[in-house]
Image (spheres, helix red, strand yellow):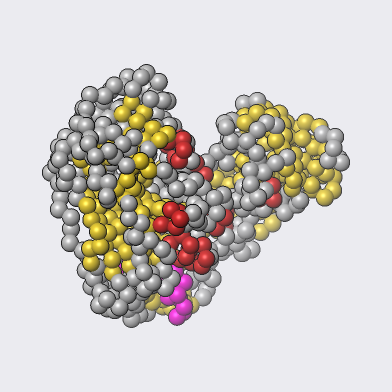
Amino acid sequence: MSNKPEDTDVGGGRGGRRRGQRARAGAVAAVLLAATVTGISLTTEASAGTVSPAAISPAAIPAAPAGFTTTWSDDFSGAAGTGLNTGTWKYDTGPGSSFGTGEIETMTNSTSNVFQDGNGHLVLRALHSGTNPGSGWTSGRVETQAATFGAPAGGVVRMESLIQQPNVTTANGAGYWPAFWMLGAPLRSGVGWPTSGEIDILEDINGRSSVFGTLHCGTPSGGPCHESTGIGSGERACGGCQTAYHDYAVEIDRSVSPEQIRWYLDGNNYFTLNATVVDATTWANAVDHPFFIIYDLAMGGGFPAAFGGGPNASTVSGGQMNIDWVAVYNKGPGSGGGDTTAPSTPTGLTASGTTSTSTNLSWNASTDNVGVTGYDVLRNGTSVATVTGTTYTASGLTPSTAYSFAVRARDAANNVSGNSNTVNVTTSAGGGGGGNIAQGKPATSSSNENATLGPANAVDGSLTTRWSSGFSDPQWIRIDLGQTYDISHVTLNWEAAYGRAYQIQTSPDGNTWTNIFSTTTGDGGTDDLAITGTGRYIRMNGTQRATAYGYSLFEFSVNGTPASGGGSTLLSQGHPATSSSNENATLGPANAVDGNTGTRWSSGFSDPQWIQVDLGASHSISRVVLNWEAAFGRAYQLQTSADGTTWTNIFSTTTGDGGIDDLTVTGTGRYVRMNGTQRSGPYGYSLWEFQVYGS
């Protein structure tokens, strides 16, 4: 897999509140298996066929990692066709609809759905009966009786399992949703979800051969953890995870400051969350206590729906999640297992490709007795970034300025090496002119990997945030500069997922585009481009990705000077907004006019609904941009009013398709509203941004 930089992502993407969640509204009733169990049946009924798994020899539970001791484990060594030991495990049974995620299966304690195979594996199997793929599914969900697995203050806990995901593909696996996860022990004593914490170690959907890692915390809707999507890794590639066993693990580390949660796939740390991602109380309530472990194989629901839906007529019956073993390891404070050895000092730091605003750094990897987790990059003696690899592009530098750089290594116990050799660079004079005119301006995009990786991140002046698109071609990111500029310079600071082929384009109106730069040989890093063009809008239009991921930019900087003319002005941002209803108090109408594509307004789940903005005075309206979340309007009107009471239609549609509606309109009024008359689905109307332009 690609070990991409450790970003803090919301679990979901566009439509994310239904994408990454495994939310549970409360403690789920458990039904214990009877003392006598029946044999398993390998005959299943399904219109689309069945899955026939092959027997695989079990692997031994590994010894505890260095510094850890084994707290608990299970290698599922029961006889073929038997259920689980109910002194250790309990069954969560009943309709999936009771779990709060839209699942359609019924969870049972039958050994047709949950059984040990006699070859050292626990099997959760999803079975279908009947001809309607949207009903008739049964499957299994189990959780540990013990809710005692956690890290004490100053300690570390590691939960780990060897799992084969259901052997299905995107062609026949729509709707499959396997998961290995944990809920906080306080949930069993009445503390609500997600305050009590949930950590998803493995989730995948629809046979995508992926893995998602997520933390759920805070309040049930919105809040510091962006519920109900949570804070997560986003989708990460998991090659061969449907056809072979892979090792999934999470570590809660309370021995470092700030505390961390680290996710691992086959021993590779692919995602890390620091406690500082939320406030101290939210983190402590969600993380600083024991957990219980859960396995389940769901069918259907919000997460699969966000990636195309299912089950459908092609979905096979009999897909199964095979678990070889599970183990919990602990490292206690002051137990002698604590790591106090610092990594070796990095060597061979060099700088190359220095431009007027950036330079590329590279160095030799350090070694550590446990493992290096990252490198601090120091500029003029101050840490400016922490990266997981041995390269870094320092961008946003000032032309004709001298800088010194060094790096140092750190490990999971927060032991830090000495500084590397120092390299000195001086940026060139450049030719930007006018400063970065893109910073802080409204930005939109063709798609976002998830809700925390929106286009505003590429114009916020920070190299620790980024925009990332969906994983397909073509994709674009666009900036509204607010008026017409003569463009002289563009800097693209790429993350690891860069564009092989792309164009820089300008437009007077956001509709008609002119190429001012084009390449088919992009190589990532920092593209520092001296170009010439004129426009109010500028975009990077990606036509060929360099990796399996999308297009991802830390920063999209533009230099230029105002031109004559100027065009229409963004009138709505920051003005008072009201609405017919709100889904909840955190999803109010002000979110749609705050210039932030990471926040949104969402209405109640009925028709009709509206959102309106008071421009403060009468204006001539020339353009409206609706940036829809997944819950969009199928039929709606744009209306203007002089008094907020009497309305005139300036646009109307009954065929809305979501995404971004960039509409050229003609009208006059102090008030502008979107009046929704038909929703696209069971949810409400939801807008990331409602932008009104005019003069």
Residue 660 versus residue 226 in the image, above or below:
above
Q: Position of residue 568 (x, y in %)?
A: 74, 46
Tell whether 203 sits left or right of 669: left
Residue 80 versus residue 430 in the image, above or below:
above
Tell whether 669 sits left or right of 189: right
Of residues 197 and 67, which is closer to you in this image?
Answer: 197
Q: Position of residue 171 (x, y in %)?
A: 33, 29
Of residues 616 and 26, which is closer to you in this image?
Answer: 26
Q: Which residues are magenta?
A: 372-386
Q: Position of residue 457 (x, y in %)?
A: 54, 56
Identify the residue shown where x is 19% and y is 31%.
39
The answer to whether one can see residue 409 in this image is no
Of residues 87 and 460, which is closer to you in this image?
Answer: 87
Q: Position of residue 486 (x, y in %)?
A: 64, 54
The answer to whether one can see residue 239 in this image is yes
Quadrant hosting residue 544: top left
Tell whether 635 sits left or right of 21: right
Tell whether 418 sits left or right of 79: right
